[in-house]
Image: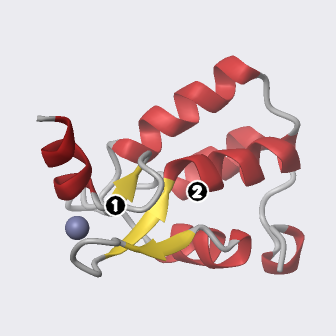
Amino acid sequence: MSLDSIGVPASYVAFHERAFLLDKLGIPENDFMDEVVDAVGAKFRCGSCGTGVVSVTGVSEAVGAHYDLSSDQRLLLEGDLENWAYEFSTDGGLCRAHASGSRG
Ligand SMILES: [Zn+2]
């Protein structure tokens, strides 16, 4: 699977708008991001509790490669992902709670 297979917008600006769109109540619309995460295979389960987690790095690498993003743009995207409604993690095999817990 790739981003092409789900028909993402041609420009990164349009992709970003669609990925981080809020509904009328200000709640994130996750349907599109769900498709993106599935397409790039960035989901895993926390090695400690089994919670479904999305890899920030996995998404940013796939999206960054697709749109040929600069390293600065990728960092911004990773920040957006971490602030998103999903359980995102930058830690290899752990959910946010267990990753932060292990850092003290
Ligand atoms: Zn966990």
Kindly identify the residue that appears in the image at 46 percent across and 64 percent down.
Answer: 54
Q: Is residue 8 above or below residue 1?
A: above
| Quadrant assignment, res 18 | bottom right
Say which label, 2 or 1, has the lower sequence index.
2
Q: Position of residue 27 (x, y in %)?
A: 25, 61
Kindly identify the residue that appears in the image at 44 percent across and 39 percent down.
Answer: 80
Q: Position of residue 100 (x, y in %)?
A: 19, 43
Secondary structure under the numbered disc 1 in the rendered image: loop
Please state which of residues 19 and 52 is positioned toward the viewer in this rendering.
52
The numbered dot on residue 94 is: 1
Label 1, ligand 1: CB separation under 8 Å:
yes
Q: Position of residue 93 (x, y in %)?
A: 43, 62
Q: Residue flagged by tag 2: what amino acid is it?
A: Arg
Please state which of residues 79 and 43 is positioned toward the viewer in this rendering.
43
Secondary structure under the numbered disc 2 in the rendered image: helix
- Mark 2 residue crowding within 10 angstroms, few (<14) / some (14–19) / many (20+): some
The numbered dot on residue 18 is: 2
